[in-house]
Image (spheres, helix red, strand yellow):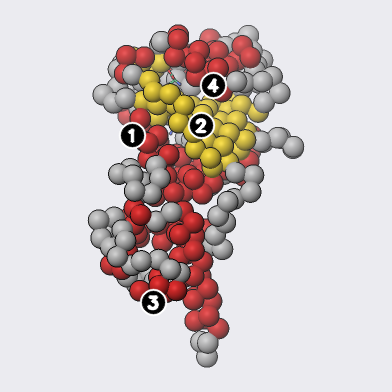
Amino acid sequence: QARKRFGQNFLHDPGVIERIVRSINPKPEDALVEIGPGLGAITEEILALNPRLQVVELDRDLIPVLRTKFFNYPDFRIHEADALSFDFSQLVEPGQRLRIVGNLPYNISTPLIFHLLAQAGVVQDMHFMLQKEVVQRLAAVPGDNNYGRLGIMAQYFCKVQPLFDVGPGAFRPAPKVDSAIVRLVPHDTLPHPARDLGTLQSVVRTAFNARRKTLRKALAGVISVDQLQTLGINDGLRPENLSLADYVRIADLVVEAKGAGEGTDD
Ligand code: SAM
């Protein structure tokens, strides 16, 4: 019986499962980690290709089910843990980076993605099943309705590739929403590195807390109209019009101005 609080919708369509595993393309030498294996629908297909798969599952009732089902894979490891606070770097072996996969619980997918982005340095790639709308947000570009904090921060760290859509009928119980598979590949070199990540995050959060307002109003208290002009950014635009590069420039100027302010303190 699926449990709602764990966001459990189990995949049962063999064609969809096969297509997901083909997109992941697991190799025997990969350090693969699955988040939320559930009853093991994707797990089973990956194990056939990579018997060293590790999984992170929160629902303790599923652990014995997984152990029994995959007892003949001695290198298969189950971590009974909350992926939201799990330190994925503990799974990395020297010279390796993780390949993370998961049909994620939709109720926690956004915080989980932020948690994983913070660990992007130890990740080779990630393949996730998400609510289709979340995939659209991840891939959104300036001007899109769905463009915002999630897409900007995902694209700061990763190349975002939506792969294909999956209808509700592929799951039991069927979710109320459409789903999609996305691939996130952390950049080897950040295309727009910020001087201070925390400042970038807070500028983006502040801007999109007032996404209908003009930048002048949305970023009042963060950056002045004069400063925006210095950057050649029109203060009459809205938060959804700025690119990642623009947000990084704003955040860098905020850091610079703060540094200058501190320097003249006494
Ligand atoms: N992968 C399975 C499948 O495709 O059939 C199950 C997918 S189901 C949408 C999400 C899974 O994530 C469930 O097994 C659920 O128990 C697990 N889960 C929920 N919250 C979790 C968390 N915070 N950390 C780890 N696993 C979690």
| Marks 3/1: CA–CA distance | 36 Å
Report the Cα–Cα distance between label 3 and label 4.
Answer: 48 Å
Task: State the SS at label 4.
Answer: helix
Q: Earlier in the sequence, mark 4 or mark 2?
A: 4
Q: Which circle, 2 or 3, is nearer the viewer?
A: 3
What type is the residue that disc 1 sits on?
Glu
Please name the residue that numbered disc 1 is placed on.
133
Residue type indicated by callout 3: Asp
Q: Name the mark nearer the viewer: 3 or 4.
A: 3
Instruction: Give residue 173's quadrant in the image.
Output: top left
Q: Position of residue 264 (x, y in %)?
A: 53, 87
Give the amino acid type for the residue marked by disc 2 in the picture: Arg
Of labels 1 and 2, earlier in sequence is 1
Residue neighbourhood size for the residue with mark 2, other residues' Cα within 10 Å, grouped as few (<14), some (14–19), many (≥20): many
> In this figure, which residue is indicated by the disc labeled 3?
226
Q: Earlier in the sequence, mark 3 or mark 1?
A: 1
Which residue is the site of mark 2? Answer: 183
Q: Determine whether label 4 and label 2 are within 8 Å by CB.
A: yes
Of marks 3 and 4, which one's residue comes earlier in the chain?
Answer: 4
The image quarter containing residue 226 is bottom left
Mark 4 within 8 Å of ligand 1, using the beta carbon: no
Q: Crowding near pointer 4: few (<14 within 10 Å), some, many (20+)?
A: some
Give the Cα distance between marks 2 and 3: 40 Å
Q: Which residue is mark 4?
A: 23
Residue visible at 38% across and 49% down in the picture? 142
The image shows residue 38, relative to residue 192, as above or below, that is above
| Mark 1 beta carbon near ligand 1 (under 8 Å) | no
Residue 94 vertical placement versus 61 (above, below): below
Could you tell which of marks 2 and 3 lies nearer the N-terminus?
2
